[in-house]
Image (cartoon, rainbow, N blue to C red):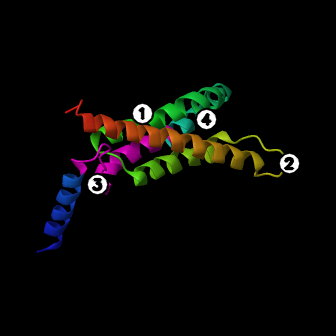
């Protein structure tokens, strides 16, 4: 039995186990994750760069609209689609949380308070974003996996 046959047997056993679960688990692989990671990179790293290039108006849109309202909904929507198509995966939840939270350090933390130290505001915003985006991604992925179990989108 070669490696490919063993992997197929392993995946088929995992999928047989998933038939009895309310929340089906995804088989984590680069093939299934790459498009979701690309979508997250485009939405959390390329879009803020484009808004930064627009000047003050783009920065205001980014600070007021994206960081508070759209970013958590984007994480929820991407993970909901992943859950419906693939199932639940803790690794994908962590990848989505880390990719989205790092954008808070890179693009949204422009205010520094010298009295509290240079890293106070960025670390607070990062930790809050990590918590919020992690919860939204986790809920989206669980809900998507439950929808997959119900068989609504077959």
User: From the viewer's perspective, is the residue at label 2 or at label 3 nearer?
Assistant: 3
Secondary structure under badge 4?
Answer: helix
Label 2: few (<14), some (14–19) or many (≥20) C-alpha neighbours in 10 Å: few
Residue marked by disc 3: 27
Quote the CA–CA distance across marks 3 and 4: 37 Å
Kindly indicate whether the residue at mark 4 contacts the one at mark 2 (C-beta within 8 angstroms): no
* Residue shown at 37% from the left, 44% from the top: 36
Quote the CA–CA distance across marks 1 and 3: 20 Å
Quote the CA–CA distance across marks 2 and 3: 47 Å
Q: Earlier in the sequence, mark 4 or mark 1?
A: 4
User: From the viewer's perspective, is the residue at label 4 or at label 1 nearer?
Assistant: 1
Secondary structure under badge 3?
Answer: loop
Kindly indicate whether the residue at mark 2 contacts the one at mark 1 (C-beta within 8 angstroms): no
User: From the viewer's perspective, is the residue at label 1 or at label 3 nearer?
Assistant: 3
Q: Earlier in the sequence, mark 2 or mark 4?
A: 4
Residue marked by disc 2: 114
Label 1: few (<14), some (14–19) or many (≥20) C-alpha neighbours in 10 Å: some
User: From the viewer's perspective, is the residue at label 1 or at label 2 nearer?
Assistant: 1
Secondary structure under badge 2?
Answer: loop
* Label placed on residue 52: 4
Quote the CA–CA distance across marks 4 and 1: 24 Å
Secondary structure under badge 1?
Answer: helix
Most foreground residue, 131 or 50: 131
Judged left or right of residue 96, residue 18 is left
Q: Which residues are magenta?
A: 18-44
Judged left or right of residue 15, residue 29 is right
Most foreground residue, 152 or 31: 152
* Residue shown at 30% from the left, 38% from the top: 84
Quote the CA–CA distance across marks 2 and 4: 24 Å
Residue marked by disc 1: 77
Kindly indicate whether the residue at mark 4 contacts the one at mark 3 (C-beta within 8 angstroms): no
């Amino acid at each position: 039995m070669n490696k490919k046959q063993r992997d197929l047997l392993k995946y088929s056993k995992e999928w047989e186990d998933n038939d009895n679960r309310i929340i089906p688990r995804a088989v984590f692989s680069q093939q299934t994750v790459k498009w979701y990671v690309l979508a997250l990179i485009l939405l959390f790293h390329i879009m803020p760069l484009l808004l930064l290039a627009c000047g003050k108006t783009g920065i205001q849109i980014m600070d007021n609209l994206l960081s508070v309202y759209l970013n958590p909904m984007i994480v929820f929507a991407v993970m909901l689609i992943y859950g419906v198509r693939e199932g639940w995966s803790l690794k994908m939840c962590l990848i989505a949380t880390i990719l989205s939270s790092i954008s808070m350090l890179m693009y949204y933390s422009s205010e520094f308070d010298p009295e509290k130290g240079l890293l106070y505001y960025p670390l607070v915003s990062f930790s809050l974003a990590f918590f919020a985006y992690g919860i939204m991604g986790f809920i989206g992925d669980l809900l998507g996996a439950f929808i997959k179990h119900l068989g609504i989108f077959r």
